[in-house]
Amino acid sequence: MKYRTLGRTGYSISEIGFGAWGIGKQLWVGAEDSESLKALHRAIDQGLNFIDTALAYGGGHSEALVGQVLRDREERVFVATKIPPRNQRWPASGSLEEVFPRRHIIQSTETSLRNLGVETLDLLQLHVWSPSWIQDDQWFETLSQLKEEGKIAHFGISVNDHQPRTAEELVQSGRIDTIQVIYNVFEQAPEDRLFPLCREKGVGVIARVPFDEGALTGSITPETKFPRKDWRNFYFQGDRREQVREHVQELGALLDGETRTLPELALKFCLHTPAVSAVIPGMRSVNHVEVNLAVSDQDPLSGEIIGKLRGHRWDKNFYEKP
Ligand SMILES: NC(=O)c1ccc[n+]([C@@H]2O[C@H](COP(=O)([O-])OP(=O)(O)OC[C@H]3O[C@@H](n4cnc5c(N)ncnc54)[C@H](OP(=O)(O)O)[C@@H]3O)[C@@H](O)[C@H]2O)c1
């Protein structure tokens, strides 16, 4: 496993981290806690030391599982969690008072501390961000106060889906330590302006959704069925699985002796960018942990393959209704 610095937090984190949304179970149907715990332990065995979770993932269930693992391990594992929007609306919508009032920030922090069983949160992220809030100091003052009290060590934001431009002014302001943003073979827009800005400002970048919710693993076909109530019935609704197959089929031609599978290609694409501190694939099984973490030990993609992947940008937003 290779390690990179998470911007000005100074944390040396594994370049492949653990995306812990799925193990929260609420929207991802089919996770088993026993397997999720084994997957987390296996990841740490293989050198992973960065986990991304959120209070919203299963109403604290993901955090609780992560906390259980932290108690059982002696290794230093950095955990990033998130404050949910009080009005439960993704992407960000509403005034700052409706979404992140001071009392809500403090209460969520206390709940996450309890769920994780730690005295200080390594990194606390606002789970949504609207550029209109930059004029309002309340969120910043509340988080700064929590930092002074030792309840959080660093804070940042999770950028709204496919809206990297909405984080630019905040990164420029120097007020946050990290951003988390969708970045993958299809969604390359953060490279245009946001990543150079983050490098300039020393802001750590966490690349989320590297597989486009599974599309870039090659396992989504028009025949794919998801469990009832699994949120991917929404994401891959209508003819979207057909569209995915068309886009992914073309990527198969880029595999070779060194990069043999689509998940490897997808992760290596995210890692080719120096601005990225860690990529956080969602994983709920030991098997996925083992194959994904092995990618860090492989050779990076050649400039030629990266050049070809540039042609696979795909401007879409499946988080919205068609
Ligand atoms: N707004 C936000 O802040 C936000 C939103 C979305 C995600 N996130 C964070 O980003 C993380 C990653 O995103 P994500 O989990 O939504 O999506 P993702 O990482 O793009 O894809 C996850 C999917 O890929 C599958 N997978 C993983 N490794 C695989 C492999 N080697 N071969 C085949 N399939 C594989 C997973 O299966 P299994 O689950 O069965 O292992 C799961 O179905 C989340 O867990 C969360 O921490 C944050």
Image (cartoon, grey):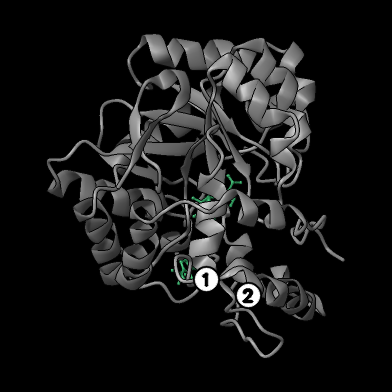
Instruction: Quote the CA–CA distance across marks 1 and 2.
Output: 9 Å
Residue 298 sits in quarter: bottom left
Q: Answer with left or right where residue 45 lies relative to residue 264.
A: left
For this rendering, which residue is in front, 90 or 248?
A: 248
Q: Residue at x 68, y 41 (%)?
A: 87
- In the rendering, at what x and y percent does residue 82 appear? 50, 38
| Mark nearer the viewer, 1 or 2 | 1
- Identified at 22% across, 44% down, the residue is 70
What residue is disc 2 on? 252
- Residue occupying the point 38% across, 68% down: 288
Residue 26 in percent (x, y) is at: 50, 64
Mark 1 sits on what residue?
Answer: 256
State left or right for residue 94 relative to residue 123.
Answer: right
Mark 1–mark 2 CB contact (< 8 Å): no
Task: For ligand 1, tell me if the residue under mark 1 lies within 8 Å.
Answer: no
Circle 1: is it few (<14), some (14-19), or many (20+) Cα within 10 Å?
Answer: few
